Image (cartoon, grey):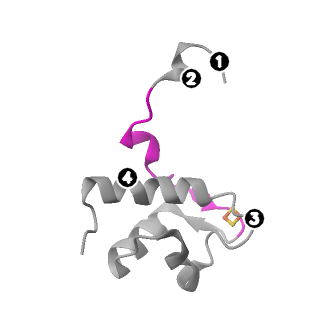
């Protein structure tokens, strides 16, 4: 990664989209799986994925990506009860 002007741009909602591939490497959970669970169960907090997938319960390396995505969904009103 270059440390130039590009690295200082504002974070946008597009930056917070989940990957289409693996998000949680410890438990092999993909972005589409997390999206489907969030829609089906109205998940709004990171910890709520644990009973369904264990996502985020290992090294927690995926936690920031999942939390950023959930925060973006909340801002946009996606999945609002
Ligand atoms: S990558 Fe998700 S808990 Fe380790």
Q: Which mark is residue 51?
A: none
- The mark nearer the N terminus, 3 or 2, is 2
From the image, tell me which residue sits under label 3: 59
Mark drawn on residue 72: 4
- Spatial separation of the CA atoms under disc 1 and disc 4: 25 Å
Q: Position of residue 2 (x, y in %)?
A: 65, 18
- Identify the mark nearer the N-term, 3 or 4: 3
Q: In the rendered image, which residue does mark 1 sit on?
A: 3
Is residue 34 shown left or right of residue 50? left
- Residue 65 x %, y %: 55, 53
Q: Residues under labels 2 and 4: Cα distance? A: 20 Å
Identify the residue at image location x=26%, y=53%. Answer: 76
Mark 4 Cα shell of 10 Å, populated few (<14), some (14-19), many (≥20): some
Q: CA distance from mark 3 to mark 4?
A: 23 Å
Badge 2 is on which residue? 7
For the C terminus, which image quadrant?
bottom left
Q: Which residues are magenta?
A: 10-26
Q: Are marks 1 and 4 in contact (CB under 8 Å)?
A: no
Image-based side of 62 in relation to 17, left or right:
right
Total marks placed? 4
- Mark 2 residue's CB less than 8 Å from ligand 1: no
* Discs 2, 1 touching: Cβ within 8 Å: yes
Residue 15: in magenta span: yes
| Residue at screen point 50% across, 78% down | 48
């Amino acid at each position: 990664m270059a440390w130039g002007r590009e690295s200082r741009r504002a974070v946008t909602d597009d930056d917070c989209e989940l990957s289409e591939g693996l998000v949680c490497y410890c438990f092999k959970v993909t972005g589409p799986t997390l999206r489907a669970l969030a829609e089906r169960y109205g998940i709004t907090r990171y910890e709520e994925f644990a009973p369904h997938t264990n996502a985020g319960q290992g090294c927690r390396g995926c936690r920031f990506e999942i939390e950023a995505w959930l925060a973006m969904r909340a801002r946009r009103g996606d999945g609002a009860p």
